[in-house]
Image: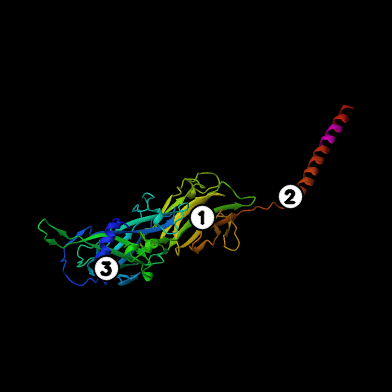
Amino acid sequence: MKKRTIAKTGATMLTMAMLLNGTTVFAAGTDYGTTIEGTKTTTFDKFLVMDKQANVPNATFSYAVKAGNAKAYDVNGKKFQVLAGVDADKITMAGVGEGAEANKIVFKQGDNSDTHDATKDAYVKDLDSAKQKYAMKTAKLDLSAVTFTEPGVYRYIITESGTNQAITNDADLTRVLDVYVNDASTTDTDGKLTKKLTIAGYVLHSNADDEPDVAAGEDFGSAGSYTDKKSQGFTNSYDTSDLTLRKQVTGNQASRDKYFEFTLNIDNAQPNTKYAVVIDDADVKSQANAATIDANANQVNVTSITTDENGKATQKFYLQHGQQVTVQGIAKDTTYALTENTEDYKSTANTAASSVVTIKTGTDSAEVNGTIASKDLTTGYLNTRDGVIPTGVIMTVAPFAAVTLLGAAGMVTIKMRKKEDDAE
């Protein structure tokens, strides 16, 4: 949360203005007029956490601002109160992200919102930086049209809403925004008083249902215990998984050189979603060989897939025995269907209960048709081609060969005897 640091001196001035001999100060009256100095804008961040290999999804979030509840304090006999925010309907937020309307934050595929330094990592709830990354956008609230009429701490509630595929919203959909308005009156050399107010700073807190204390300082009625609830913004998570497609071949007449054609169909995804495809364990291009049909030779295995406007995509892959490709970052509830051209091989589809293909480490065995559900999956086909040599072939041939040889030997013997007889 970007804000001015409120020094103890400023906090003391603020609280002294509110105390007025221990009497609660309300925001009624117009003695100060409407002149407000100081920074009239403040910001909050929106974090979207995802697996490192996932791409930023298309997602939209909306925000509304309303007045918070006034909260009275009585600490050691010193009394003051936080005031309900005024003119909440006049606080505006420009749209954030390409094509975003007012009061909305929009993430889009390829907007590079996941590219930033790590200075705000500490503000992202439950971030596992070894496995995860986050996308971030910053919203600016403009309070220029708000009329503050007295010093005080003015409280507002910011509420987030949005329903997006595979995205879990922040467990706390509200933030408390406290605006510190100080007395900034001046006296000229003639002793003339000019009354003015200034916005000294902003503090964003979590947990609207347990509204926090203010930072006025323990000497003036508040211990400032809100500090453990300070917030930078909202954190949501994007649930994706990887899908590995694997090819295996077996049988005494099966070729390990042969490339088979796989067809992957993706459905029920967000429109225009891009997935990275890892082909490290496959060939970039299938090769021509005696075992591969012409249609499957010299085909390129792609490194990305993008869904269309209806959230669908179809992509072919060409794999030999032992090869695999992995489609990364598929959102929860997306469906898939894998088929193959088996040609003259017997094909057995992988199942979740009885895997027929070797499972990639760290993944679960899966059906060739299924739904993505918060875990990495491996599926594919086992193709079998066996030949049987007829029994008794050698025994059938051997006697025939022996008879033939004996017949030839007999003919030689007869000829030799005839020559001997002629010689006599």
Q: CA distance from mark 1 to mark 2?
A: 45 Å
Looking at the image, is mark 1 or mark 3 nearer the viewer? 3
Which quadrant holds residue 421? top right
Q: Quadrant of the C terminus?
A: top right
Which stretch did the figure color magenta? 411-417
Which quadrant holds residue 181? bottom left
Residue at horizontal 42 percent and vertical 61 percent from the top: 237
Q: CA distance from mark 2 to mark 3?
A: 111 Å
Which circle's residue, 1 or 2, is located before the other in the chain?
1
- The residue indicated by pointer 1 is 244
Q: Amino acid at mark 2?
A: Val
Q: Amino acid at mark 1?
A: Thr
- Dot 2 falls on a residue whose secondary structure is helix
Q: Is residue 413 magenta?
A: yes
Does residue 14 appear left or right of residue 416 in this picture? left
Which residue is at the front of the view, 268 or 396? 268
Which residue is at the front of the view, 402 or 178? 178
**Label 1: how many Cα within 10 Å (few below 14, some 14–19, many 20+):** many
Give coordinates of residue 422: x percent, y percent: 86, 29
Which residue is at the front of the view, 5 or 146? 5
Which quadrant holds residue 404? top right
Which circle's residue, 2 or 3, is located before the other in the chain?
3
Give coordinates of residue 150: x percent, y percent: 21, 67
Residue at the far left in the pictured view: 190
Kindly tell me whether residue 155 is visible in this rendering.
Answer: yes
Give coordinates of residue 393: x percent, y percent: 74, 49
Q: Amino acid at mark 3?
A: Leu
Q: Is residue 45 magenta?
A: no
- Dot 3 falls on a residue whose secondary structure is helix
- The residue indicated by pointer 3 is 19
Give coordinates of residue 164: x percent, y percent: 38, 65
